[in-house]
Image: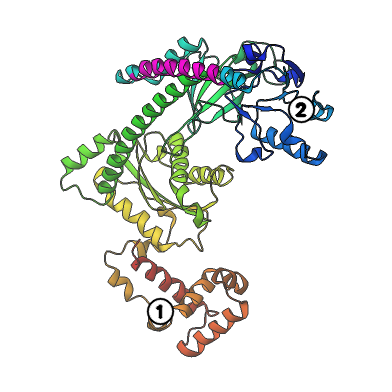
Amino acid sequence: MLVREMLTLPSFSGAQVVAGGGFLDHEITSAMILEGADIQNWGRRDQLIISSYFALMNLDENGLIRFFRTMSTIGIGAFAIKLGRAVDEVPQKIIELCDDFDLPLIRLSPEVKYEAILSDVLGHVLDSNLTLLNRFYEAHKHVMALALKQPSIPYILNTLKNSLHAETTYLDSQRDRRLGTDATLAEFTGYSFARRDPSPYQTHAYFDARLFYDAAASGDGAGADGGERPERDALAIRIPSSDGVDYYLIIHGDAAQLTPVDTMLVENIVSLLQIEIIKQNAVKQKLFYQNNNTVHDLLLGRFPTRERIDNALALLNIDRYPCYQSLLVRATLEDPSDADRQDELHQAIRRRLRSAYPGIVWYVNGERLVILRNFRSELSGIDVDEVQRILDELHASSTLPPFEHFAVLSSTVDRYSLPSANNEVMNAYRLFDGSSYRNVSLRFDDLGIYKLLLGADDLAQLDDLIDPRLKRLHEENHDLFRTAARLCANSLNYPDTADELFLHPKTVRYRAERIRELYGIDVRKSDDFLQVILADKIFALGRKG
């Protein structure tokens, strides 16, 4: 009930609005008699406060200001004073404060009884709530009947349109996917949302939306001469989901104020859309795990026959062409506290790569993303420079957590040699650690002499290539070995190595001297420098990854 509606009740006969007359559209949902100034302990939003002024008589000017500021903060709907007991006329200070805090001030007739006011206001509220409850039941019953039909999102949107007589749009903000009852209104090129304060019967987040359109798409001439883009106001409601994506229901047109009945309908429709999103996500998740496992089994050579391989490739819809490549992307979050956003980062990388190379499939494990692509010929394979450009753009994105990457592209193989392509990228992943190869993308075919290491069938063969002095150093003092390895990887730059190992440069120099004294390895000599680099790479290949 609005204040202006409340003033028509019988107990308000003879009442006058003496302040805050421009705010009679405040909602009134309850009424309370003021017995003390501690309103912060019991006051409620949209409440009518009734007073004889007796409870406020002992407050000085600052106390009155604090009291009315507290009422404003709570969201009290109106303040009414009954004359005759404590004051015969409304104090001027109270009138000024009510005007200052946009609070309707009502002067009640001295003859009116508190019981009559409470009975009228609360009775009207109870009757209204009963009506709303009945309307909510009808709306809920209608929506639940609709849910049993398993409606599509467009069908749900049209149902709401017919009820509200307003065009509606569904927005998937991450994929920029829109579905709407009016295609033109759904073609906004930008938007801004400002969150509304919650109101009764709203359990979801509501936003005042500003939608921006290109002049040609909007159908009006605004912006055609280079001026500002056309804009339209709308109402947006966030649809909760479990996948971390923001989905919105947008109601176009004059949606600034929904009636309580409309709000209840919208709440039910949002819940129905939420169910549909959860259902779609469950199907996607099942398909994701199925494809993820299939790609993994292909890369590891777990299918025993060529027929099983053919069937798996057909299931993934990557069996049309003779050529295959594997691309491994290691995306390491810079801040460990962002660990819960790893999947968000992988999704962004997959989305951009899929835009450049449609039809790719992938396998995800921890920070690693392995892409598998089927293509016609060498000319249409994955371009490692394009991969680097895409990842550089993602680094510059303000919406993604900061990360570092290392990407390696396999050579081209046939469908029955996918494990060899996987071995290439996995061995390169082990060989090139993130400390020295940050934000680079490589091709296996360009690795030169390192391919001799990566092509070894037996790691024991590589073990014989390690300088015996370095074997001893690695076994007896791993910290010293790591210092030598990082110093060589950093081209004997002592300050850079110290920063990487969280040491003082003098400590790095001391350790290098100890290595020379104890093991006869002088990293300043080109032969020993090369031996350290080679040993570090072979030890890296021996690590699990």
37, above or below 17, in the image: below
Residue 525: percent from left, percent from top: 53, 80
Please state the extent of the stretch shown in magenta in the rendering: 122-144
Front of the two marks 1 and 2: 2
Q: Residue at x 47, y 17 (%)?
A: 132
Q: Quadrant of residue 253?
A: top right
Quadrant in which the N terminus is drawn: top right
Residue 140 in the magenta stretch? The answer is yes
Pick out the residue farthest to the bottom: 517
Q: Which residue is mark 1?
A: 474
The amino acid at mark 1 is His
Q: Which mark is residue 362?
A: none
- Of mark 1 and mark 2, the one earlier in the sequence is 2
Q: Residue at x 30, y 42 (%)?
A: 289
Judging by the rendered image, the residue that carries numbered circle 2 is 98
Dot 1: what SS?
Answer: helix
Please, what is the three-letter code of the amino acid marked with disc 2? Answer: Cys
Residue at horizontal 64%, vertical 34%?
A: 74
> Left or right of 91: which side holds 293?
left
Q: Residues within 10 Å of mark 2 (few under 14, many from 20)?
A: many
Front-most of 338 and 205? 205
Query: Residue 229 at x, y = what percent?
Result: 68, 20
